[in-house]
Image (cartoon, rainbow, N blue to C red):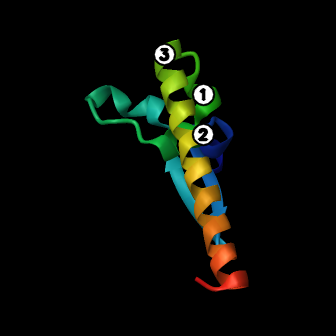
Amino acid sequence: MARMLQLRVMRRWQSDGQSQYYINPAYFIANGKRLTLDLFMHFQDELQPLLPPEIMQEFLRQARDKAVLKSDANAEAERIVNHGS
């Protein structure tokens, strides 16, 4: 597994004190499966030479939208906690 991590075939992600492992989609996406936003974000550097620029831009737009939604939800939750509904 260490070699697969070193070669960037896999990536380890720490979340809530637990390790999660992701397989680089460049090695299996050719079978017609859809690339998810999460996998794109984890392997963005490796996928850049493989994906057309318009696809890269679409994934980056989705990531930006997701961050805004998360930010808005966090701000709303904080407002409710601090000021009531």
Residue depth check, mark 3 versus mark 1: number of the one nearer the observer: 3
User: Counting residues from the N terminus, which is met first, the one under dot 2 or under dot 3?
Assistant: 3
Q: Are marks 2 and 3 in contact (CB under 8 Å)?
A: no
Residue found at x 62% / y 74%: 77
Q: Give left or right: position of 76 versus 33.
A: right
Residue depth check, mark 2 versus mark 1: number of the one nearer the observer: 2
Q: Quadrant of residue 32?
A: top left
Residue depth check, mark 2 versus mark 3: number of the one nearer the observer: 2
In this view of the protein, can residue 1 be seen by the observer?
no
- Relative vertical location of residue 67 with respect to residue 48 in this rendering, above or below: below
**Quick one: SS at disc 1?**
helix
Q: Which residue is mark 2?
A: 64
Mark 3 closeness class: few <14, some 14–19, many ≥20 residues within 10 Å: few
Viewer-nearest residue: 14 or 3:
14
Marks 3 and 1 sit apart, C-alpha to C-alpha, by: 16 Å
Residue 27 rendering spot, x and y as whole percentages = 43, 31
User: Counting residues from the N terminus, which is met first, the one under dot 3 or under dot 1?
Assistant: 1
Identify the amino acid type marked 2: Arg
Q: Are marks 2 and 1 in contact (CB under 8 Å)?
A: no
Q: Which residue is mark 1?
A: 46
- Relative vertical location of residue 61 with respect to residue 54 in this rendering, above or below: below
Q: Which quadrant of the figure contains the C terminus?
A: bottom right
Identify the amino acid type marked 1: Glu
Identify the amino acid type marked 3: Glu
Marks 2 and 1 sit apart, C-alpha to C-alpha, by: 20 Å
Residue found at x 40% / y 36%: 35
